[in-house]
Amino acid sequence: GYQRVLEENRKLYNQVQDLKGNIRVYCRVRPVKGQSNKLSSVDHIDDGSITIITPSKYGKEGRKSFTFNKAFGPSASQAEVFADTQPLIRSVLDGYNVCIFAYGQTGSGKTHTMTGPDVITEKTMGVNYRALSDLFMISDQRKDTISYDISVQMIEIYNEQVRDLLVADGVNKRYPFYYMLVSSTIIIIINISFTDIVLVSLTLQTLEIRNSSQNGLNVPDANLVPVKSSTDVISLMNLGQKNRAVGSTAMNDRSSRSHSCLTVHVQGKNLSSGTLLRGCMHLVDLAGSERVEKTEAVGERLKEAQHINKSLSALGDVISSLAQKNAHVPYRNSKLTQLLQDSLGGHAKTLMFVHIAPEHDAIGETISTLKFAERVSSVELGAARANKENSDVKELKEQIASLKAALARKE
Ligand code: ADP
Ligand code: MG
């Protein structure tokens, strides 16, 4: 009796804790590039903190520690990283909105965590693939009680413009030829099928973000593709990857200067009660967070840097404004925060992977990355809430209160 009450109490307490929607921050340090005897700027890593060696101008002792919900060292495997992400991912099947994003300077391992290295095997695949196959597995286990529909979208935000990555052959279906040719927004088409030369100006398709739409789709015009298996997902992600690469040949590694987002939409129908639930998960590989020296950047490069700066600082502003419980949260200051709006409020679960490149020459960026992360992880948001009517948290709190009362009577 007594033991069971205690156990139940603990279980419920954990469930309530689990439902708390504060932003979690995991730090991941990748291996040092090249020879393994090369020194690292990371002094040591334990389960929840990392200590870096700082040049004297950054601190008295030359050591500084940062604390996170979790820290992964260079030897942490993709499977280990995923294991600590899995509960969050599964909650999307219970109707929660989830956002996982990868932050860090270019080359620090963002894509490695989210997607994997260039050659992706079962062992090396990143969070994206593992998340989807896990969702398929769990939805299959539940198929006698809940029927799930899972669909995905994949978009890119580059220079504050939203582009669909799930279009055939890397091109906009309607204007394929022109899309390949042009990088500005206005193009002129010379139509020679008529004797007159007809000049038509077109706006290159950039997609709108709409928040709080009925069906939870905030980029309604991006292709939404139903997926049934991991194989479906792999071929879609290959397409998306290829489409990102199309931009990069023209603009030289564009992927590090754009945000890419895989969005998973889940709809579940309870087969006996008919209740519907809806969950949405954004898996975001952010643009490189490195500051571009003002003196170096000109033209296109400067413009990109300004857009990245703007969106990453908008992300920081949104989070700190949520932390201060401001009435107005400036979601609309960037496309990125607009896109993530539903996943960055008090009712969603958010996880940020912060990536560290351990080389000494990256120390400046490492410190500013860790400071950004520290600012983010100090946030406590309200309890997460599933997109369904009954409030789980309230129910659990009541149960805990009554169990506590029962416990008190026993003592
Ligand atoms: P980013 O996306 O932040 O620019 P990448 O994910 O492309 O960085 O990583 C840069 C390089 O380092 C890649 O070759 C990648 O495979 C490798 N790498 C990154 N993280 C790890 C890791 N944890 N273990 C092994 N190799 C890694
Ligand atoms: Mg990358």
Image: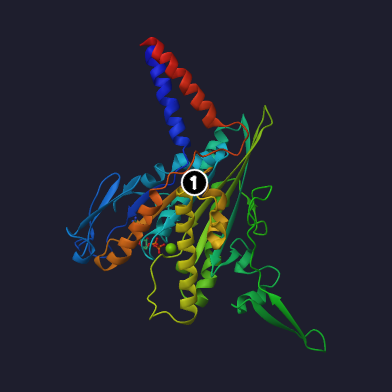
What amino acid type should be assigned to the residue bearing mark 1?
Answer: Ala
On the rendered image, what quadrant is the C terminus found in?
Answer: top left
Q: Position of residue 315 (x, y in %)?
A: 48, 58
How many dots with numbers?
1
Report whether residue 76 is seen.
no
Q: Is residue 209 left or right of residue 365?
A: right
Q: Horizontal and vertical percent for residue 181?
A: 61, 79
Left or right: 378, with 386 as reference point: left
At 43% from the left and 59% from the top, the residue drawn is 111
Q: Foreground residue, 314 or 90?
A: 314
Q: Quadrant of residue 171?
A: bottom right
The picture places residue 330, in percent across and down from the top left corner, at 54, 57
User: Which residue extends farthest front?
Assistant: 327
> In the image, is the residue at mark 1 within 8 Å of ligand 1 by its beta carbon?
no
Residue at image coords 63%, 76%: 185
Residue that mark 1 sits on: 131
Residue 393, percent across and down?
A: 52, 31
